[in-house]
Amino acid sequence: MNWFYIEGVLILAGINIIAVLGLSLLTGFTGLFSFGHAGFMAIGAYSAVYFGERMGLPFAVSVVAGGLVAGLVSLFIGRLTLKLKGDYFCIATLGFGEAIRLVLDNVQVFGGARGWPGIPLKVDLVTVTIFNIVGILFLMFLINSRHGRSMIAVREEELAAKVIGIDTYRYKVISLFISAVYAGIAGGLLGYYLTFLQPKLFGLQKSTEYTIMVIFGGIGSISGSVLAAFILTVLPEMLRSFAVWRFVIYGAAVIFIMIARPQGLMGGKEITLKGIAGILGIPGRNRKTARSGEV
């Protein structure tokens, strides 16, 4: 197993982390389950490559612009679907995701079902790491802000949130927009890493995988989403030597974890420096004493 292969797996894990962070905001913190996020990813991927290769925009600008296009499309989709409740919203987003895939199958300017080959490789591990850090920090800032607390209130009890004056529809729109931007950016990075785009890359299976990752990590946990996206991307590659049995082992492992720990890996909690210090057996008082020079 050489470094080139390991780097490739880590890059794919990083791209998945970005997409899952966005879905975590919508599902984990706002309480809206979506099965159409692969559609936003596809929009971001094709838009980013179009901006970069047809319009000549710089790589980073084209990727972010692709994310914004996905976000703008989400505003239109949100206007049609966000007043729906529960399963109806899920079904609507599922239909949207499949509609995007079918449209791309038939739009020849993007290569249609044959795909878009010849995209230059512009993504490496450093690039993905930078996007990951920025994405995590922004989401942490948002969740700990007044707006983030309002989104959590929508998830916990929408009617009560309305009673205390929170514009629940507005926060659903904001959450969907940011979530779609994250998915679009992940799509752009994926296109520039694979150097090839094809509509079937963004089918229902992709949306389902991301939803599983959010639930696996723990609803309402940024740390859990990051860990789950990393583990569920790397695990199939670790099991590759088992050939066809790797999918059985992978599925069994996911089912076992979800039964043994239905609240997910983190259960809505976050990894903190204080928590890490506690695991390492470094009490807070001792750290304070050490800093002050006391014995």
Image (tube, rainbow, N blue to C red):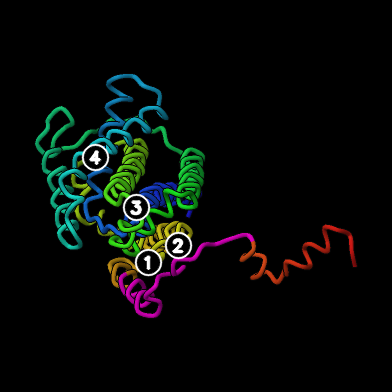
185 sits left or right of 288 in the view: left
| Residue 169: percent from left, percent from top | 26, 49
| Residue 165: percent from left, percent from top | 34, 52
Q: Which residues are magenta?
A: 251-273
Mark 1 element type: helix
**How far apart are labels 4 and 3 at the CA level?**
23 Å
- Kind of residue indicated by mark 1: Phe
Identify the residue under disc 4: 75
Which label number is shown at residue 224? 2
| Residue 262: percent from left, percent from top | 37, 75
Q: Is residue 4 visible?
A: no
Which label number is shown at residue 165? 3
Residue pushed farthest bottom?
A: 260
Identify the residue under disc 1: 216
- Kind of residue indicated by mark 3: Gly
Closer to the N terminus: mark 3 or mark 2? 3
- Kind of residue indicated by mark 2: Gly
Judge depth for marks 4 and 3 and give the one in front. Answer: 3
Magenta span includes 144: no
Examine the rendered structure and indicate whether residue 261 appears above or below residue 5. below
